Amino acid sequence: MGLFGRIIVGLMPLTPKFVINRVARRYVAGSDLESAIALMQKMEGEGACFTIDVLGEEIQNIGEARYFVDEYSRLIDEITISNLDANISLKPTAFGLLIDEDIALVNIEEIVEKAAINNIFVRLDMENHRVTQPTIDIVFKMQSRGYNNIGTVLQSRLFRTTDDINNIVKQLGGLADLRICKGIYLESAEIAETGYREIVDATNSCIELMLELGVYTAIASHDLPIINHTLESLKNNGFELGKPDPRPNASESKEGKGEGYEFQFLLGVRGDVRRKLSAQGHRTRVYIPYGTRWYEYSNRRLRENPDVAWHIAKALLLPWTNRR
Ligand code: FAD
């Protein structure tokens, strides 16, 4: 799989931009906010709720962060006006985290505050290992200033993640709200699992721990061994569809949340699995990226993890294996 992925990535510079544009359309809502809103209004009928991401990351100078603050602010207004069941996901490095942590915090607080006023939850996406701790620290700082509408993402492939889950629960108790995913960045064997089986096992252990500790658990995986293991763990923790969160240490109920957990999917990936979970009564959320920087974003993601290129090629060539 890695080899196919690398071949596809190697061919990318030879591929005309309009071809890549056609492929990206499956995974990106469009270049502007209006396209994202229109898409979500169309998808609402599928029983999904949403988290919206303005494409972009790792700005080169701190002035660029203003674009993201303004665009997320406009996004919050639009979610509120259109009454969508949606929250937001943002990348701290787009707000300047790798340039100046203090300024990034001020920028992010502007969005978290506005989101809080509008009862919208803010998820800090997790980027590579350089910013794991600074990202978690932003959540702690915002929570200590009284903003309870914020959480982040942990990557199960990292060895540190079990400790992070325990520390976050220790600090935030019932306000701990985490998305757990494998992690898209291929980290070194010194700090992370690198084999498929080990990463799946690590993800399943994290999900079990989070459910056990009362965390609001967002499971972000399209991988059936993880989804099926989660369904089993939910049963073992006493969850029943349509019934309140049974855990004595359950996270405090918050605006726009399900009963203690939700499944999350990327736009364009395994829609059939998502729709099935939704029809069974599970809360399902679709991650909707939009923005003008879709080309740079797609290129970068593919170079970082060539497996993604293979998944995309398979989805296009064998569409019955992966419905939008
Ligand atoms: P895989 O084994 O990679 O995929 C299982 C199957 O899903 C594949 O066989 C394929 O059929 C399909 N599939 C998966 N990805 C794609 C794709 N791109 N295109 C087409 N088909 C695909 N990672 C981070 O590091 N930080 C984050 O903040 C973060 N947020 C995320 C938010 C959401 C909602 C989701 C769903 C993922 C997020 N990720 C994030 C990415 C995640 O870490 C994984 O890299 C990604 O989900 C692929 O892992 P998987 O568990 O789906 O399993």
Image (tube, rainbow, N blue to C red):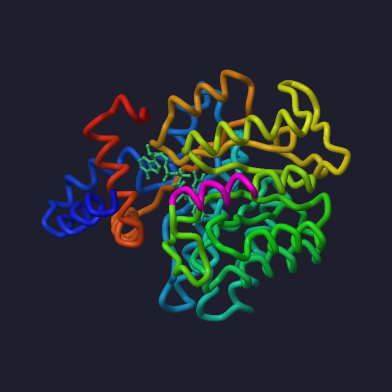
Q: Is residue 78 part of the magenta span, yes or no?
A: no
Work out whether residue 110 or residue 192 is closer to the camera in this orientation and state it. 192
For the point 56% across and 25% down, the residue is: 277
Q: Which residue is drawn at the image coordinates 58% and 51% (left, top)? A: 202
Quarter location, residue 48: top right
Q: Is residue 173 left or right of residue 305?
A: right
Residue 66 appears anywhere in the view: no
Chief SS of the magenta region: helix
Question: Looking at the rendering, in which quadrant would you find the C terminus?
Answer: top left
Residue 136: give x, y in percent of width and height: 66, 65
Q: Is residue 199 magenta?
A: yes
Percent from the top left, x then y, of residue 297? 35, 58
Visible in this render: residue 165? yes
As displayed, is residue 271 above or below residue 119? above
Farthest top residue in view: 279
At x 21% / y 48%, what residue is drawn?
20
